[in-house]
Structures are given as structure tokens and as C-alpha cells.
């Protein structure tokens, strides 16, 4: 699918930002439009397409029919990363039983908080591949992983090690050999409405809402050496439908389910 939109700069710009914006436009195959003090609303009205606003810190994607922009930020990954390093526990890392050196696939990247925690857990000797079906989300997050500078260096290092691929999880899985990664993780959009965490609402504008299927889960079980993990709303019927054993978390809005694959390892 061809990416649609235009690239421009923030209102107050610099030569450095201009160069960055022109690079982004060239890499993404989009036209670059000088800002000329025009408001975002005027640009959206004029071009009726997504406006990618490049600043020194980040890239914001303004959908023509949405108010809030999509941009990359570690969100709760910062808090979770510090907590994990201090206390040694995190819901995702614990559910996946991640170890140093593991090869992990986050099959539903989103804004990438879970991929960042997985990357910290598996370390430099491990590998995290993050799949995202939405082209806009994959580009925004990939650029964020490569350039965002937080105040927590271990998290920055973890971001840089993540490989982001724009593709559907089934498309990727069908091309992989048996038992070729350790853990595959799914965090699909909830079927039930929940209060959005900070930064999540704009994600819904661009998110892919394709449902998980038996074929996707079967392929994931074939490709994973250790386990396949599903994070979903505690009321979700997908756990039972796809054969996941739920790891009960009292009072939690979401639960983790697992399918263990070690039985297939010689």
C-alpha cells in the first residue's frame, strides 16, 4: 500500500529540522511542504491528507479527520523498565518467561511499550522483531526507536535493538521455518471498550483491526520454540477459542494466556 500524506516541519523550525524533514519525506516517498506559518488545521483542510510534522524531538501524524496526533513516546515503558531493573518483575516479561538471548516476536507492535520491555529482558544477545500491519504506526514507531532519547539509557539501548517490520503477522509467519524463534506475543485491540491510557487514543485512528484467526495461532505455534502468548481483556473469548491457558491476574483488566510449545523441541 502506498503511503499517503505530506511532510512538513514544526512552526518554529531550524536548518537541522528542515534537513530531517526532507530526509523523512525522501525515505517515506512523500512530498515535502514548507510550513510558511500555516496552522495544522489549514494544512489538513488544504491537502485533505495526513500531515507529518517533523520537529527536533519527534514526528507527529495528523489525520485529516482526527484531532489528536499520533507520535512515538515510551509511555509506561519508562516506568516499567526502571521497575523491572530494580525489582526483577514485569507482567509481560513474567508471562513470556523471557530470558537473556531469547528471540522474541511482538506480532502486534502498536506504540511499542511491550517490545521495549522484551528487548530489555532478552538483552544484546537476544533479538526482538516487531510486526505492525499499519504502515503509519510502523513508520512513526520505527523512527522513534531509532532516534528517541529518554533519560534512561538502558531503555534507549533496548529501543535501538528492535527490528520493526511493516507486515501482517500471518504474512510474516507463513515465511518462517519451524521452531525458528523462542516466543511469539500477540496484543490485539481489545474487543471490549476500556479507558485509553495516555497516547493510546490516537493509535486507534491508524490501528489494524483484523481479528486473530485459528490459522494465525497455528502458524505461531509452529514457528515458536517455547511458547505463544496472548494478552487480552479478561472477558475475551479468544483465550478459550484458540486454546490458551489463562494466567489469572486478580483485579486486572487484561490477562495473559499461553500455549506451551516445548513438547515439539527435541
Image (cartoon, rainbow, N blue to C red):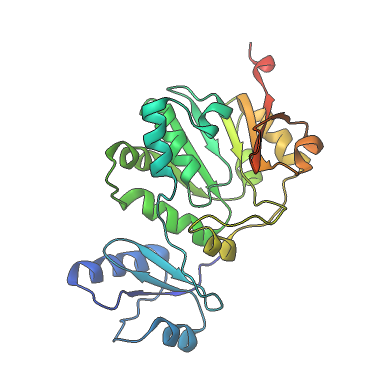
What residue appears at the point 30 percent right and 70 percent down from the top-left corner?
22
Quarter of image, res 21: bottom left
Q: Can residue 126 be seen in this view?
A: no
Query: From what the image shows, is residue 4 above or below residue 195?
Result: below
Residue 136: where, in percent of width, then height?
Answer: 50, 62
Q: Residue furthest left?
A: 15
Query: Left of 50 or right of it: where is 143?
Result: left
Query: From what the image shows, is residue 89 above or below residue 164?
Result: above
Q: Residue furthest front?
A: 251
Quarter of image, res 213: top right
Q: Residue furthest top?
A: 266
Quadrant of the snapshot with the N terminus: bottom right
Q: Can residue 76 be seen in this view?
A: yes
Residue 218: where, in percent of width, then height?
Answer: 73, 34
Query: From what the image shows, is residue 181 above or below residue 36?
Result: above
What residue appears at the point 72 percent right and 46 percent down from the top-left corner?
212
Quarter of image, res 222: top right
Residue 78: where, in percent of width, then height?
Answer: 38, 43
What residue appears at the point 37 percent right and 49 percent down from the top-left corner?
145
Decide which of 249, 92 is in the foreground and name it.
Answer: 249
Quadrant of the snapshot with the C terminus: top right
Decide which of 180, 207 is in the foreground and name it.
Answer: 207
Residue 108: where, in percent of width, then height?
Answer: 58, 46
Decide which of 4, 191 is in the foreground and name it.
Answer: 191
Query: Left of 191 or right of it: where is 42?
Result: left
* Image mark count: 0
Amino acid at each position: 500500500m502506498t503511503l499517503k500524506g505530506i511532510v512538513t516541519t514544526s512552526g518554529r523550525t531550524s536548518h537541522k529540522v528542515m534537513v530531517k524533514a526532507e530526509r523523512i519525506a525522501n525515505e517515506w516517498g512523500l512530498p515535502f511542504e514548507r510550513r510558511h506559518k500555516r496552522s495544522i488545521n489549514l494544512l489538513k483542510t488544504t491537502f485533505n491528507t495526513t500531515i507529518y510534522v517533523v520537529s527536533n524531538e519527534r514526528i507527529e501524524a495528523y489525520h485529516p479527520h482526527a484531532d489528536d496526533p499520533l507520535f512515538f513516546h515510551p509511555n509506561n515503558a519508562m516506568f516499567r523498565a526502571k521497575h523491572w531493573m530494580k525489582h526483577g518483575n514485569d507482567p509481560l516479561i513474567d508471562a513470556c518467561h523471557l530470558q537473556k538471548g531469547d528471540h522474541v516476536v511482538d506480532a502486534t507492535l502498536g506504540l511499542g511499550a511491550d517490545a521495549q520491555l522484551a528487548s530489555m529482558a532478552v538483552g544484546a544477545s537476544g533479538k526482538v522483531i516487531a510486526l505492525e500491519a499499519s504502515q503509519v504506526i510502523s513508520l512513526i514507531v520505527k523512527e522513534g526507536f531509532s532516534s528517541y532519547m529518554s533519560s534512561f539509557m538502558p531503555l534507549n539501548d533496548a529501543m535501538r535493538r528492535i527490528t520493526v517490520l511493516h507486515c501482517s503477522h500471518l504474512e510474516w509467519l507463513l515465511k518462517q521455518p519451524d521452531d525458528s524463534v523462542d516466543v511469539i506475543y500477540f496484543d490485539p485491540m481489545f474487543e471490549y471498550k476500556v479507558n485509553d491510557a495516555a497516547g493510546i487514543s490516537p493509535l486507534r485512528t491508524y490501528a489494524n483491526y483484523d481479528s486473530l484467526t485459528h490459522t494465525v495461532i497455528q502458524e505461531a505455534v509452529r514457528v515458536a520454540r517455547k511458547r505463544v502468548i496472548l494478552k487480552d481483556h479478561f472477558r475475551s473469548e479468544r483465550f478459550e477459542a484458540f486454546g490458551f491457558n489463562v494466567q489469572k491476574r486478580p483485579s486486572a483488566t487484561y490477562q495473559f494466556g499461553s500455549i506451551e510449545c516445548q513438547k515439539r523441541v527435541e
